[in-house]
Amino acid sequence: MNIFQHFFSTLLLTILVFNVSAQETEEEKKVFINNEATINSDKLEYSPAFYEDGIVFISTKVSNKRFKMKDKRIDKNVMSIFQSKREENGLLLPPTPFSIELLSTVHEGPLTFDRTGETMFFTRNTTKDGRRIKAKDGITKMSIYQAENVAGKWVNITSLPFNDKEYNTVHPSISVEGDVLYFASNREGGAGGMDIWSVKKIGDDWSEPRNLGPSVNTESDEIFPFVHADGTLYFASNGHIGFGGLDLFFSRPGGDWSPATNLGAPFNSENDDFGFIIDRDKKNGYFSSSRNGGYGADDIYSFYVSGNLDELFDEDNRPKVVRDFTMMVSDNISSEMIEGATITYTNLDNLSITKAITGGSDPELQSPEDEDTDLLLRVPMAEMGLNGVTDFLGKFPVALSTGNYAFVIEKPGYQSRQILVDTENSTEEIFVSLDKEVAIVDNGMNGSNGMNGSNGTNGIDGNNPTGTNGMDGTGTVNPDGSITTVDGSSTNGSTYTGSNGGFSNTIREGSVFQLPNIYYNFNDASIRPDAKVDLDALAGFLSQYPDVKIELSSHTDSRGGSRYNKKLSQKRAENSVAYLIRQGLPANRMVAVGYGEEAIRNHCTNGKECTEDEHQYNRRTEVKILRMNNEINIQFVNDTSPPTYVDKANFNSGSSESTSSSSAISGDYTVIAGVYANYENAQKKQGRLIEKGYPQTSIQTVGNYYHIVVNTFQDRSQALNLQTNLTSDEIKSFLKE
């Protein structure tokens, strides 16, 4: 995507802000779990699998009166396969039996589909010619069968050659390339109990089963494997350390499988959690659980990850840790610590793009006049995420998990600051200095020559933030009083964020941009609830500009049959257009095109070996402007992209050379009376402290800031005594340990 496409996709869709309280943990905000009440009952519902526009799953509900058959060993009806399709709003419909051809008087168990959805592997009691085959112990075991979809019916049902009537062979999961099948079995050669095994497809046959080894398997049970397109294996186990009962784990491929990693809460509970599946983008999925609060013994739950499931774990597959940080806010001139500064922060890694351009109903959005084709979109950072205030020492403690965070620091009488914090590379103390507000003096320039809007109202009163400046062209007055002009320059350097702070561009016929938040489940063309927000945004844009006609296209990666990919992508594009039509847009303004794998954007064509990320780059939904009467000029102010600067103190890196006669900070306890961005201001504060009787005061350069070091001590009590003296002299300070 070129820079224009990137900017426009950001312009079209603003940031969704989840209104969460400060008491919520990072984990609670990242994963949202829902009991699928439409499909759950007081019977067993478990082991979902993606299929077409919805899911299939296993249940002990009676599928058909002909097949009402109770298994006396479990005192429940035999298990059958059910299907639940998704309705237009993206929610699951009540379930129906999946396939009349597969109904029987024996158990039908967990299943998996190949990429095309035309071949299925499923679990069933071991049978031959419709008769049960018992093992030596008198029990009919489970085996894996294959079936093919021919003209809409599942036929050619065959038992796979690696089944063994003496052992259970269950829970198949096929790789995205269709060349490796994973399953669970208690056959000989395992670690004990049920283990996870794999077989490779060799022509029309299968290899001998291979045990996945001790990283995955234990002396207890490992069952319900699910292999993701990137090769990650998810499974359930009661042998690895967990929360209780069966827990969900994952392991990554390599020379050997990586050690099993517990998925943690809220996926796992003190009861059984199993049957996990997740879509290609690792955002949405389902799993089974017998946790408290369900409808039956086992229920199916859906989940949504804000961001990506992998973001919950570091590169060593460990849950990302939470670290404690303290933000220190001071006056840039006096270096006095600022009490009561409001701090708003959000995790940039987990934002969902949603809010639409909606005809000017948003007070932060200015709609164009009839003769004006400029589009101005403002993103109010103050609405984002969690917030708090600094204490009397200017401190704000906060616990953050691994990731990138945006902070906005505000205080009446001061210019607001926006900073970026990378928790992996930032020190525990984050220093921020605020500048006093600068009053804008009316110099007599009015109308088109000054800072007033075209309708004559004052451009800085908040009612009309845009105006025309006789020297610099169109400008926008920021909330702090600074003006961001079309070329990205600013009248106040302290709030300028480079090219991300403001820019101008043009939408014209032929422009193409991507809808970044539209995802589809595997082999699924239905509109998911989280995808609707982007389509709502597009609907708002088209409503605001009724002369625009678009092509809405869907693209797949190269894996799977080209004809199947073409058909699937066409259906996805048509469903998106149908959704827009239901929002009241005329059908003649939109064209749905499914390109399948015809427009691969990188080298990942048929037969090329690529990572899942490289394949994902090709799976996209795009909008192309086919026709418009007038070009649209774009301005974007207060971009939520990370600023180009970071406020943080680092006592272990950067310059350690003192800018005064003082040596570098030494000792275990350092008393600091302020942090400055301006060296001259730091010198003034140093002079005032020396005059008040603190002759050891020095200036220490740390990164791009100047720390006022009053003294350093080996003994903590001495440092605290110095702080007491400073407080009595009405000088705020803090202790660096």
Image: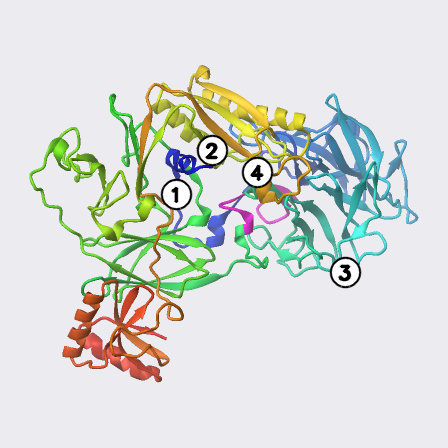
Disc 1 to disc 3, C-alpha distance = 46 Å
Instruction: Write down the residue under mark 3.
Output: 219
Instruction: Write down the residue under mark 2.
Output: 514
Q: Which residues are magenta?
A: 288-310
Element carrying mark 4: loop
Disc 4 to disc 2, C-alpha distance = 16 Å
Residue in the image at 46% along x and 47% along y: 350
Residue 37, how many percent across, how many down?
57, 37
Residue placed most toward the observer, 157 or 270? 157
> Residue extending furthest left?
444
Mark 1, mark 2: which one is toward the viewer? Answer: 2
Element carrying mark 2: strand
Disc 1 to disc 2, C-alpha distance = 21 Å
Q: Is residue 191 left or right of residue 277?
A: right
Disc 4 to disc 3, C-alpha distance = 45 Å
Instruction: Write down the residue under mark 4.
Output: 602
Residue in the image at 22% along x and 66% along y: 679
Instruction: Write down the residue under mark 1.
Output: 17
Q: Amino acid at mark 1?
A: Val
**Within 10 angstroms of label 4, few (less than 14), some, or many (20 or more) residues?**
few
Q: Amino acid at mark 3?
A: Glu
Q: Earlier in the sequence, mark 1 or mark 3?
A: 1
